[in-house]
Amino acid sequence: MAEIEHFVDPLDKSYSKFFMVENDLLPLLTASNQEATGDMIYDMPLKTAVEQKAICNETLAYFMARTFRFLKACGVRADKIRFRQHRSNEMAHYAADCWDAEVHCSYGWIEVAGHADRSCFDLTRHQEKTKVELVAARPLPEPLLVKYI
């Protein structure tokens, strides 16, 4: 397993390259399906999954698709890969959504990668500990006037 932290604008979690994967079909085991039937979803394009909020945003869905493609390129059979969403009782308090990429092997389903929308939790903690401001600027279409009383 490896870790990547990809930071996004918390007000806009769209992703410019999402169009490249929006029609991909990933094997999804949603939290609600785990608690109800245990059935996997095989036929939902990622664009639909994001629109229906099965996956909370484009950025998360994009990196899930890239992981699926990577695992297949490494030789893992597609029918041995699934993405399992964390249920409410296992979701970290700071995560908006979390999916584990799992591979079925002789030990059963094993997590090989985690995908989480952690919002700004990590940056906030880094700032608190290092006392260094970690922010990104984005241009606004119009200046924002703020009146302090």
Image (spheres, rainbow, N blue to C red):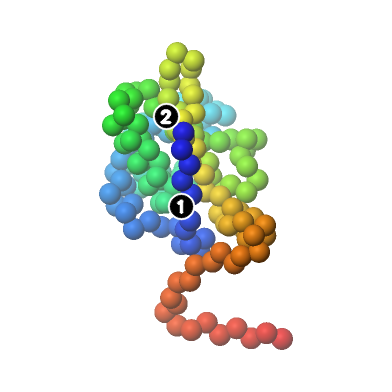
Secondary structure beneath label 2: strand
**Local crowd size for mark 2, using a 10 Å CA cut-off: few (<14), some (14–19), many (≥20):** many
Which is more toward the observer, 126 or 72? 126
Residue type highlighted by circle 2: Arg
**Local crowd size for mark 1, using a 10 Å CA cut-off: few (<14), some (14–19), many (≥20):** few
* Residue 40 in view in this figure: no
Secondary structure beneath label 1: loop
Question: Which quadrant of the structure image shows residue 24?
Answer: top left
Which is more toward the observer, 1 or 12? 1
Would you place residue 4 above or below residue 33 in this image? below
Cα separation, mark 1 vs mark 2, equals 22 Å
Question: Which quadrant of the structure image shows residue 78?
Answer: top left
Left or right for 132, reference 33:
right
The C terminus, quarter of image: bottom right
Label 2 sits on residue: 82
Find residue 95 and report its horizontal and vertical position in percent: 58, 47
Residue at x 42%, y 51% (from the top left corner)? 59
Residue at x 62%, y 56% (from the top left corner)? 126
Left or right for 136, reference 91:
left
Residue sitting at the far top: 106
Would you place residue 105 above or below residue 65 in this image? above
Label 1 sits on residue: 6
Would you place residue 24 above or below residue 78 in this image? below
* Residue 108 in view in this figure: yes
Residue sitting at the far right: 149
Find residue 20 and report its horizontal and vertical position in percent: 28, 49
Between marks 1 and 2 in the image, the one whose residue lies nearer the viewer = 1
Find residue 106 and report its horizontal and vertical position in percent: 45, 13
Residue at x 67%, y 60% (from the top left corner)? 128
Say whether disc 1 or disc 2 marks the residue closer to the N-terminus.
1
Residue type highlighted by circle 1: His
